[in-house]
Amino acid sequence: MGWAALRLYTLAVYGFMFLPVAVVVLLSFNASQFGSFPMTGFSARWFVELAQNDAILRAFRTSLILGALTALISTTLGVLAALALVRYRVPGETYISTLLIAPILVPEVVLAVALLLFLNFLEVNKSFTLLLLGHVIFTLPFVILVVQARLVAIRRDVEEAAMSLGASPVQTFFQITLPLMLPAVLAGALFAFTISFDDITGTLFWKPGGVETVPTQIFSMLRNSISPEINALGTVMIVMTVGLPLLGLALARALATRSGG
């Protein structure tokens, strides 16, 4: 009876957490312009109107560009930082590692306000560059942790064998180390993109006027009224934020299996 009650309680908790998500997805196909039950029928009209909304399309383009740049910069810096911390002796390694991971430990709203106040003190105006910088600071620790975990599992003597056969350190990295750690690199890039694409707390503090991402566009639409387009947009966001990590996990497993890791 104890295990049965625990299973029932667990199912109830998961149901409480994911039922609102299921309702949003269901209402996005409601034929009525009023997002309520009972539904009058199923229709994809709100997705069509969503694709014709210029403000939402601009927000999508901004989020995609911002997410792609964040993933590129965070992944590049994360790989370099992980290599330095795992493969080399760096003075103050513990303090540097703690500093790089610190943004995860600090609440995002505190980090957002602190960075904004610091840049205001320096008299730096809000810009897309500031927004990108904030997203890189917030996503970089995730990339470092994922890449570090993979890099620790790669045997050092494999790289030493390549260098003993005449390969330079650069050749060893691109031909030996990078292919072995590629699943973690891709997973870190997908994590960075997804976190950036889905972020709203920091974006509200850092974005300049006139620039909207998908989450901030949803937030501004909710302040006026609950349009059926919001449900459709929420469904698209759910598919992207859930589908991309699952795709990254499947790709990482396939690459790890292929490389024998």
Image (tube, grey):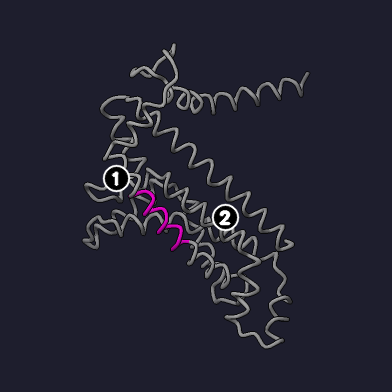
Residue 63 lies within the magenta run:
yes
- Inter-mark Cα distance, 2 to 1: 27 Å
Left or right relative to 18: residue 29: left
User: At which x and y percent is residue 251?
Assistant: 62, 53
Q: Is residue 54 above or below residue 116?
A: above
Q: Which dot marks residue 187?
A: 2
Q: Is residue 100 above or below residue 204?
A: below
Q: Residue at x 32, y 44 (%)?
A: 59
State which region is magenta.
62-74
Q: Looking at the figure, which quarter contains the N terminus?
A: top right
Amino acid type shown at disc 1: Arg
Q: Secondary structure at mark 1?
A: helix
The dominant secondary structure in magenta is: helix
Q: Looking at the figure, which quarter contains the C terminus?
A: bottom right
Q: Is residue 218 above or below residue 177?
A: above
In front: 31, or 192? 31
Q: Is there a contact, CB below 8 Å, between mark 2 and mark 1?
A: no
Q: Within 10 angstroms of label 1, few (less than 14), some, or many (20 or more) residues?
A: some
Amino acid type shown at disc 2: Ala
User: At which x and y percent is residue 153?
Assistant: 70, 64
User: At which x and y percent is residue 11?
Assistant: 64, 24
Q: Residue at x 69, y 77 (%)?
A: 159
Q: Which residue is mark 1?
A: 58
Q: Residue at x 33, y 45 (%)?
A: 213
In front: 67, or 175? 175
Left or right relative to 107: residue 172: right
In front: 41, or 79? 41
